[in-house]
């Protein structure tokens, strides 16, 4: 009987590990950046450091429309305009480097930032 209980406990631990990997695995969420934070034409924060492979969530705040384009990286850009407060999109940065980004409609007002990827 002790062997059965021991085997059952091992089975449960292995099963929990597999289930955890399946449901909790995936993207590493590194940060959230608000576009138009506090009614200002800014990204908040406008500078972050993440690891390669991490995902950043951009959330539409106030004074829309906003978007996010990455200089020299159209594959990472989200050029569609977000009009609704709370609307969001995710961008995964696969390689190390510095990524300068901006909101196209408000770049002239200084709505810019940089993401450092290690």
Image: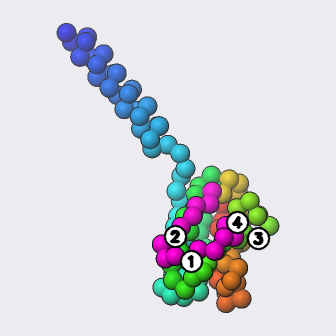
| Residue 94 seen in this snapshot | yes
- Disc 1 to disc 2: CB gap under 8 Å: yes
Q: CA distance from mark 1 to mark 2?
A: 8 Å
Task: Look at the image and give the residue range highlighted in magenta.
Answer: 78-92
Q: Are marks 3 and 1 in contact (CB under 8 Å)?
A: no
Numbered circle sitting on residue 87: 2
| 3 vs 2, front mark | 2
Q: Could you tell me how many numbered marks the image carries?
A: 4
Rendering coords of residue 47 (x, y %): 61, 73
Give the residue furthest to the left: 1
Q: Quadrant of residue 113?
A: bottom right
Question: Is residue 114 visible from the viewing direction of this image?
Answer: no
Q: Nearer the viewer, mark 4 or mark 3?
A: 4
C-beta proximity under 8 Å, tags 3 and 2:
no
Numbered badge on residue 9: none
Element type where label 2 sits in the image? loop
Viewer-side residue, 75 vs 87:
87
Query: Quadrant of the image for the C terminus?
Result: bottom right
> Quick one: label 4 or label 3, which is nearer the N terminus?
3
Q: Which residue is mark 3?
A: 71
Using the numbered discs, state the Cα–Cα distance from disc 3 to disc 1 in whole angstroms.
22 Å
Question: Which residue is identified by label 4?
Answer: 77
Q: Nearer the viewer, mark 3 or mark 1?
A: 1
Please tell me how crowded label 1 is: few (under 14), some (14-19), or many (20+) other residues with Cα within 10 Å.
some
The residue labelled by disc 1 is 83
């Amino acid at each position: 009987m002790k062997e059965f209980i021991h085997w059952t406990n091992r089975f449960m631990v292995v099963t929990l590990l597999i289930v955890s990997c399946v449901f909790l695995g995936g993207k590493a969420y590194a940060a959230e950046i608000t576009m138009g934070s506090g009614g200002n034409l800014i990204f908040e924060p406008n500078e972050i450091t993440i690891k390669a492979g991490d995902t950043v969530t951009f959330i539409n705040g106030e004074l829309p429309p906003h978007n996010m384009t990455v200089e020299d990286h159209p594959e990472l850009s989200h050029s569609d305009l977000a009009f609704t407060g709370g609307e969001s999109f995710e961008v995964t940065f696969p390689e190390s480097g510095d990524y300068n980004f901006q909101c196209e409609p408000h770049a002239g007002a200084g709505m810019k930032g940089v993401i450092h990827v290690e």
